[in-house]
Image (cartoon, rainbow, N blue to C red):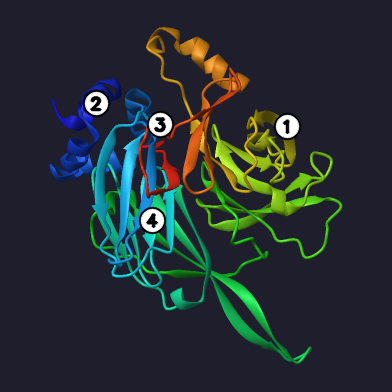
Amino acid sequence: MEFNNLPKDIIFDIFSRIPLKPLYKLRCVCKKWQLFLDLCPEFRGFYHQKHKISPILLFKKQNNENPKTQLSSYYIDSTQIHQFSTNFPQNLTSILTCNGILCLISDFEAQLYDPIIKRVSNLPNSPHFSSTFTRAFGFSPYRNEFKLLHFYIVATFDNYHYCQVKEIMCEIITCPNSQLGLISQENWRFLGKCPFHILGRKDYANVNSMIYWLIEEKNYNPDGVKIMSFNLEIEIFGVVNFSRKYSNRSIECLNLVEIKGKLCLSDRLPWESTMNVWMMINEEMGFANLWEKKYQIDLMGIFHHDVRILGHLINNNNNNNNNNNNNNNNNNNGDDGEIMMKIGEKSFGRYELKSQEYKEMGDEIKMEGWNLQLMINRKLL
């Protein structure tokens, strides 16, 4: 029987039994298999649900005697994957991640790297890298391609006010998932002027097919905090509002993060021992400005100015397969799993939502001299 004539559930069952790295190699067998593995979003989601690839913690170490940057990665269960050195002759200035892939950036170079199957793709240089303002890295599930946004500064002369002004421009480059590990054939595309002045020093949030940034406040806005969005599927900008009725804090106290597939906003002053987490609700129904306080995290005496949420961890208990329906219901209650947190450069741990307890992980993973950068979480094949 030919491949195309097999029932979908049989095809899914066969391919889902294959480990990730050999599965990617099967794309070279024939064109039909390549198209199936690259262009079937249902299978990519099915494969991830079956295998539940554990999130990875990425650590960075800079050697003063060697300009190259060392990266080391661990599964959350403390199993080290490998340690590797980048091919950059300069220090890494930025490390971004989305859907399990790393975007490694130096002053004038960028490459995509898969830490599990070790595929590398070098992206073409942009003539605007020397005037970089900030970058963002996202994934389009529908198109099955990664996208890197590059925001850069252009100085222009304002004839009306007779002065020089600086504007933020944006360009984008795509890399199909199927081309990871190959020489990129794509080019940078100009998107135009950035519609808002985003906070480049703040973390952005990747949520499904959207990227979100906090917008800078030149003056206090009594109505609320503005959040710029970018749709990775249709490549347009938008705006979301976080009303002052939820929190009256300054934007310096806020950070964006994705938790359980939702846009969230953490709210904390440096001297406070608790952190409030607001979640945007009903976004899929078109009500993008409704928020609810989802969590109040007790940091138990941790008074550090830099406390960040890296992401959400799902508890994979042994009885999950027998209680899928119950687990699906629990996922909607917001009291399951753990939140991975980073405190400063070296301290990190997990906050269990059900017991409301914070557990330091420094004793589990010994990384003296290394700095925790981010958590890598593969959500789709």
Among the two numbered marks 3 and 4 on one chain, the one whose residue lies closer to the N terminus: 4
Gap between marks 1 and 3, in whole Å? Answer: 35 Å
Q: Residue 309, percent across and down?
A: 56, 40
The quarter holding residue 62 reads bottom left
The local secondary structure at tag 4 comes to strand
Q: Residue furthest top?
A: 322
Among the two numbered marks 1 and 2 on one chain, the one whose residue lies closer to the N terminus: 2
- Frontmost of labels 2 and 3 is 3
**Numbered mark located on residue 292 in the image:** 1
Name the residue: 28% across, 53% down: 180
- Frontmost of labels 4 and 2 is 4
The local secondary structure at tag 3 comes to loop
The local secondary structure at tag 1 comes to strand
Q: Amino acid at mark 2?
A: Ile
Q: Is residue 140 visible?
A: no
Q: Residue 50, percent across and down?
A: 34, 23
The quarter holding residue 78 reads top left
Quarter of the rendering occupied by the C terminus: top left
Crowding near pointer 3: few (<14 within 10 Å), some, many (20+)?
few
Q: Amino acid at mark 1?
A: Glu
Q: Nearer the viewer, residue 63 or 252?
A: 63
Name the residue: 40% across, 52% down: 146
Q: Is residue 123 visible?
A: yes
- Frontmost of labels 1 and 2 is 1
Among the two numbered marks 4 and 2 on one chain, the one whose residue lies closer to the N terminus: 2
Gap between marks 4 and 1, in whole Å? Answer: 32 Å
Gap between marks 3 and 4, in whole Å? Answer: 29 Å
**Would you say 86 lies left or right of 143 here?**
left
Where does label 4 land, which residue?
A: 103
Gap between marks 4 and 2, in whole Å? Answer: 32 Å
